[in-house]
Image: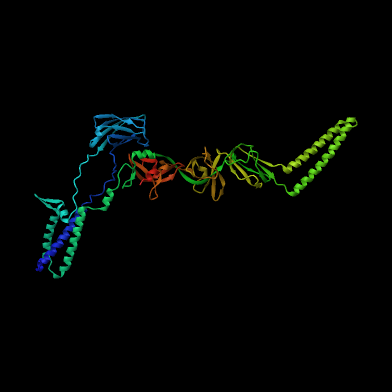
Amino acid sequence: MFIRSTGALRRLQAMLIGLGLLTTIAAAVAHEGHDHGAPPPAAVTTNNPRVTAQSDAYELVGVLRGESLGIYLDRFASNEPVTDAKMAVTVGGDEEVQAEAAPDGTYTVTSAKFAGEGPLELIFAVTAPGGDDLLIGTLQLPAKAVPAAPAPARGSPLQALQNTPTVRLGSIEVATPYLIAGVALALGFLLGLVVRSRRKLVPVTGLALVLLAVSTAYAFAHEGHDHGADAAKAALPAGDTPRRLPDGTVFVPKPSQRLLNVRTTLTKPEEAQKAVSLIGRIIADPNRSGLVQSINGGRIIAPEKGLPRIGQAVRKGDVLALVEQAVPQADRTTLSERVGEIEQEIAVAETKLKRVRQLSDRGVAPPSQVTDAEIELEGLRRRREIVRQTRIEAEVLRAPIDGAIAAARVVPGQVVASQDIVFQIVDPKGLWVEALAYGEIDPAKVTGASATAADGTPLKLTFQGFSKALQQQATVVQFAVENPPGNLSVGSPVTVFAQNGASVRDIIMPRDAVVRGANGEAVVWRHTDPERFEARPVRTEPFDATRVVIRAGLAEGERIVIRGSELINQIR
């Protein structure tokens, strides 16, 4: 069938244009209406219904599993589990059940009302050595499953149009696509009256076909609502596992909090004094350490018990090693000649003593001559022994103090000089810290100090003094370590926190509470709800080896994680 009238053709083209425009506008408006305002705060979806309640003393979370309600009771301020309480639970206002304590520190309540649906009010009466309390919460029981209606089959576009929503006009119900088509025809007729020029026939027809195709495809796509993003979002698992929520907070169930040993504290301002960080190292107490060196040098000889090992405890006067002195060849010759002369004099003295004794026995010589000859002979023998010892006797190296061998740099047979350090002895209970202070601190005004070892061990320090001469443009400051740990070694690097600033009133937190966020800034984790944590950026300054001063980012009375924050920070 061919349309011969130019006016009728123009009106048909205008109808197609109107149909395409109106369909596109309607579909766009319908799709735009799909955006229902700003999204609400991220809700936590779990596999098990929950009831939460809290007061100034306790925080309670109940997790329903079947007809059994597992109850986790913690201290509100510290998040520490309460395992020695007695609890009576009123279910639905008329049934009172005594909670049973479990070996894992939780409590269990069983009731047939947990099999129902809808909201269920629970009242928890807690009796504990830390104080009694009454907590009230509502458990939202899940609705019973209803058989799902069969999904409409995807068929032809005509079937899709038949399944579309309808619009009621008075007492008549009209399908939305048919309503749009009717309005489009009317609009097309009006546009057909306007179109006059024959030159616009081809562009208008093409435009009409394009708009009609686009609007039809968009309408069917929206009707099927086939959005890949929504399908992927629906496929995400939701259960009782720790996870980061879309709003940036972290959901950590109570069982996971117990496994991670999460602890919190309530923030409160305290008197704090500004501190500065200094780089230092461990040194030995000058009065409780010593060096062992040879006076003349020579070859090392092990004693009967062997050379001492590193870490071995020694006492003052213990023999550590022997040093065989090195005697030059000229000296050896001189000593040999001297020994020969002394032996010759000894032989003459022995002959003289023998003759004097014979004369004394006959009464010719007095007994005093015999005594003089004996003394002379004994002196010559002693001189010979001294010369021999000077040539062969080894030098004995002894421990100068009580302590432990910190360094041993010799083996048997090694030749050492007189300046070489053979052994270093340190008292493990007498260690100091030597730090370099530049212009940021006045050593004379230090009121307190602490340090952190390389492995994070905190050290309590006592100020000893500082040098009056600069060393590498810095002042040397020395501190004594109070009760040093056994794993501390001389020479280990430490970070010293010296306090000498003005006192201010701020919040002081443990260093373990502050972690690094994804963007590198310092954050703490705020316990906002029983099972939810929120990252809070803060600005800190050093206070001592274990604590920092929070200068900005926190207010008084907030619950902040002080143990387990690094583990919470890693949850994704």
Asked whether residue 515 appears in the rendered view, the answer is yes
Asked whether residue 56 appears in the rendered view, the answer is no
Residue 99 quadrant: top left
The relative height of residue 447 versus residue 222 in the rendered view (above or below) is above
Position of 65 with respect to 435 (left or right) is: left
Quarter of the image for the N terminus: give it: bottom left
Tell which of 89 and 446 is nearer to you. 89
* Count of numbered tags: 0
Outermost residue, bottom side:
199
Position of 203 with respect to 75 (left or right) is: left
Residue 9, position as x, y percentages in the image: 11, 66
Tell which of 306 and 278 is nearer to you. 306
Position of 128 with respect to 175 (left or right) is: right
The residue lying at 73 percent from left, 42 percent from top is 390
Residue 321 quadrant: top right
Tell me the colour scheme of the image: rainbow
Tell which of 2 and 107 is nearer to you. 2
Residue 542, position as x, y percentages in the image: 45, 44
The residue lying at 80 percent from left, 44 percent from top is 340
Residue 174, position as x, y percentages in the image: 11, 52
Tell which of 299 and 500 is nearer to you. 299
